[in-house]
Amino acid sequence: HVGHDGAMMSTRIHPTAIIDPKAEFAEDVVVEPYAIIDGNVSIGRGCVVGPHCRITGWTAIGARNRFESHCSIGAPPQDLKYAGEKTLLEIGDGNTFREFVTIHRGTPGGGGVTRIGNDSLFMAYVHVAHDCMVGSRTIFANAATLAGHVEVHDEATIGAFSAIHQFTRVGRYAFLGGFTAAAKDCLPYMNTTGNRPPKCYGPNTIGLERKGFSDESRLALKRLWRKLRSKKMTTTEAVDEAKAELAGQPEVEVVLEFIETSQRGVILG
């Protein structure tokens, strides 16, 4: 394999791997036994494609990603309206995809692209459906599943066997406990757990402390949460009161904006 500048690359491809000649590799890519890489795929420098992975396209992969084994990356969307159109999967840098992860391309009606950010961990059997937008430094535990058009914002953690409904948003630094079934938006910085129905249990206190959030920020989020769960106020009234009393607290403002821009409603207590 030769780079675009004509220099020989140090890419290592196992002889049992099947590579379409149109696939493009940067330097230092490793392709392990029995992997299949189709045309219309580009793979950035330092990536490792493990045994029995299949990467199809149109898929663009950044640098230093690792696909452990048996991953299916860039397959067509599971959408009955999809008729083979050119749609995309874009993956950033430094992600780890463990065994049997599946990530699908976008659909024409959903924007045409599924996008993954940087430095995230996708544990075994995670599924990311068409047109999802996943931020950076996220963690998906085993078998966490996103339906189509889901947004997962930076630093969110989604617990094992959780299922996220289509068009739902998961906010920044949100923590979703295992087996959560979320059909509404999950608040930033908060711990949302359970199914039918799930409940929000307030700020993800331990996680925020581990991430380095200040005492002031965590206290402000606790004060906001007390207002949001108050039975004496509607959510709209709680938001208005929080704006007046907690103005200038950046994490509070993120949560309030998240609530006000929600199309599906948010999960509270």
Image: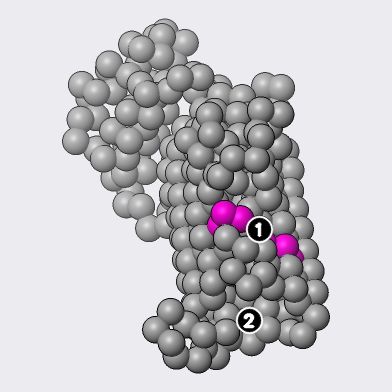
In this picture, is 83 found above or below 95? above
Secondary-structure class at tag 2: strand
Q: Percent x, y for residue 12?
A: 64, 87
82 shown above or below 7 = above
Residue at the image point whose x is 67% and y is 70% from the top: 20
Q: Which residue is mark 1?
A: 56
Nearest the camera: 118 or 148?
148
Residue range (magenta): 53-59
Disc 1, disc 2: CB below 8 Å? no
Residue 225: x %, y % from top left: 42, 28
Question: Which label is found at residue 111?
Answer: none
The answer to whether residue 176 of the structure is visible from this angle is no
Picture residue at 45% right of the left edge, 44% below the top: 153
* Quadrant assignment for the C terminus: top right
Foreground of the two, 96 or 158 = 96
What secondary structure is found at the residue carrying circle 1? loop
- Dot 2 corresponds to which residue? 30
Position of 101 with respect to 215 (left or right) is right
Mark toward the start of the polypeptide (1 vs 2)? 2
Task: Name the image quarter holding the N terminus.
Answer: bottom right
